């Protein structure tokens, strides 16, 4: 990994998109992505155990976040679950080799937590299927080649019925991507507008009424197994902060005033690792994990957000004439603080995870 890619150094010239794509393609060649995907689709044909082992190493290393995480963590598993053989052979190797970056077109201005309220329509016409509507918060759409679109064939009142998934090429006429600038200064997510966009039947994933079942079935497993590296990345961020503070007695004195909170967070990192390992064990034993996939998402996002707040407070108090180790840590912890604000929102908000656990694990339905 070149110095420009390391997230534990501040850079005058940070790595650009081309470098990040090349790095991710190399990661695949090195056996670090597509670990459980079948070899005939470009994967490495191994088990979730090896996936977990690789994720430990990825988490402990200061690697940049993946550019094509939607392709690998969401689109890929959906294609494997409902795609035709021709679709699997076509789409899957391109995802792993970084020839096609994917984005997820699910959320809309009036449909986030209540995804079944989405209104984007797709109609069968003599020219093919035609899409009209708007998506929002579409991460990475401006650098993607395909959009995993969830749209409806009927009326909004049909809710979960009549939802269909398409693999839409981003360069189709009538499809417009507008970037949104977020608080960290990045243009990481976008609005996507569909005005009479024609999509091919060959790019439909699953049957016209299968969209909801396919999306939710895969999402419950993915919520548990995606980004498994996060527990270990959390640990390495904490270790980075502590190591940087050790380089300067003034910073170390600031850090030690947070020692109880840091000790508590370290315990939570271990709890999180335990949750991930337990879920992997269940999946390897062929057990259904269903709503238990909400545990690591909820636990990680809440604990990591508290760590990010603490780290931000510590680095904000660093002396003005801090040396390079403290400067690197300050830049990294500020980035972590800003991006952590969204962690309790995306992939299902904290309130939605609590609702899933209350209803589906504790069987506590709302009183009438
Ligand atoms: C960084 C980031 C990246 C994202 N990337 C993508 C992407 O690539 N593709 C995509 O499709 N979407 C993406 N999203 C959108 C994300 O999935 C939604 O933001 C999320 O589902 C919440 O929807 P919403 O923003 O419409 O908020 P709302 O659903 O309007 O929720 C607002 C508040 O109300 C609460 N709430 C809502 N319903 C209930 C309920 N029933 N009970 C209790 N409380 C409730 C929520 O918890 C939240 O606090 C991204 C979001 C973020 C922040």
Image: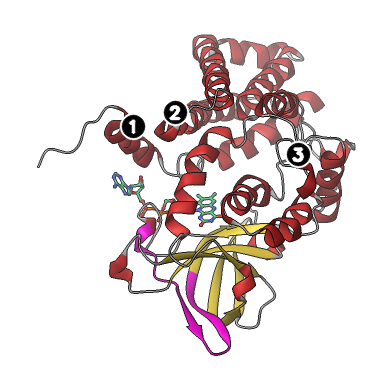
Could you tell me residue 342's position as x and y percent? 51, 44
**In the displayed structure image, the side of residue 203 where residue 159 appears, left or right:** left
Magenta part of the protein: which range? 116-134
**Mark 2 and mark 3: span between their CA atoms?**
24 Å
Q: Which one is earlier in the sequence, the residue at label 2 or at label 3? A: 3
Q: Nearer the viewer, residue 67 or 150?
A: 150
Q: Is residue 336 magenta?
A: no
Q: How many marks?
A: 3
Residue 347 visible at all: no
**Of marks 2 and 3, the one in the foreground:** 3
Could you tell me residue 334's position as x and y percent? 63, 36
Q: Which one is earlier in the sequence, the residue at label 1 or at label 2? A: 2
Q: Nearer the viewer, residue 179 or 45?
A: 45
Q: Nearer the viewer, residue 211 or 83?
A: 83
Q: Quadrant of the C terminus?
A: top left
Residue where numbered disc 2 is placed: 295
Residue 308, by quadrant, is top right
Query: What's the residue at 74%, 27% (across, down)?
Result: 54
**Mark 3 and mark 1: span between their CA atoms?**
30 Å
| Dot 1 alpha-carbon crowd within 10 angstroms: few under 14, some 14 to 19, many 20 or more | some
Residue where numbered disc 1 is placed: 357
Q: Nearer the viewer, residue 219 or 181?
A: 219
| Dot 2 alpha-carbon crowd within 10 angstroms: few under 14, some 14 to 19, many 20 or more | some
Could you tell me residue 134's position as x and y percent? 48, 72
Residue where numbered disc 3 is placed: 33
Are discs 1 and 2 less than 8 Å apart at CB?
yes
Outermost residue toward the left in this view: 368
**Mark 1 and mark 2: span between their CA atoms?**
8 Å
**In the displayed structure image, the side of residue 163 where residue 332 appears, left or right:** right
Query: What's the residue at 60%, 70% (across, down)?
Result: 178
**In the displayed structure image, the side of residue 32 where residue 291 appears, left or right:** left
């Amino acid at each position: 990994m070149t110095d420009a890619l390391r997230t534990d150094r501040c850079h005058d010239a940070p790595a650009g998109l081309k470098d990040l794509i090349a790095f991710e393609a190399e990661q695949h060649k090195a056996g670090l992505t597509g670990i459980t995907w079948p070899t005939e689709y470009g994967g490495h044909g191994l088990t979730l155990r090896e996936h977990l082992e690789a994720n430990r190493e990825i988490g402990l290393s200061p690697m940049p976040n993946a550019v094509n995480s939607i392709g690998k963590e969401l689109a890929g598993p959906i294609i494997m679950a409902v795609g035709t053989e021709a679709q699997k052979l076509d789409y899957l190797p391109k995802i792993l080799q970084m020839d096609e970056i994917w984005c997820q077109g699910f959320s809309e201005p009036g449909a986030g937590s209540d995804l079944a309220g989405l209104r984007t329509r797709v109609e069968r016409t003599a020219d093919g299927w035609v899409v009209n509507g708007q998506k929002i918060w579409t991460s990475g759409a401006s650098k993607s080649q395909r959009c995993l679109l969830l749209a409806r064939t009927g009326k909004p009142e049909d809710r979960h019925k009549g939802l269909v998934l398409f693999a839409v090429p981003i360069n189709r006429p009538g499809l417009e991507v507008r970037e949104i600038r977020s608080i960290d200064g990045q243009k990481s997510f976008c609005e996507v507008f569909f005005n009479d966009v024609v999509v091919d039947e060959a790019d439909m994933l699953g049957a016209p009424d299968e969209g909801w079942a396919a999306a939710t079935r895969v999402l419950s497993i993915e919520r548990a197994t995606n980004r498994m590296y996060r527990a270990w990345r959390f640990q390495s961020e904490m270790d980075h902060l502590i190591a940087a503070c050790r380089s300067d007695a003034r910073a170390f004195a600031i850090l030690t005033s947070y020692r109880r909170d840091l000790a508590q967070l370290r315990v939570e990192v271990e709890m999180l690792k335990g949750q991930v390992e337990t879920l992997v064990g269940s999946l390897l034993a062929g057990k259904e994990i269903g709503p238990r996939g909400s545990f690591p998402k909820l636990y990680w996002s809440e604990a990591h957000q508290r760590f990010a707040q603490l780290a931000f407070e510590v680095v904000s108090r660093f002396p003005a004439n801090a040396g390079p180790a403290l400067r690197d840590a300050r830049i990294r912890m500020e980035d972590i603080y800003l991006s952590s604000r969204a962690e309790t929102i995306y992939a299902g908000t904290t309130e939605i995870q609590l609702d899933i656990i209350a209803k589906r694990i504790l069987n506590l339905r709302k009183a009438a």
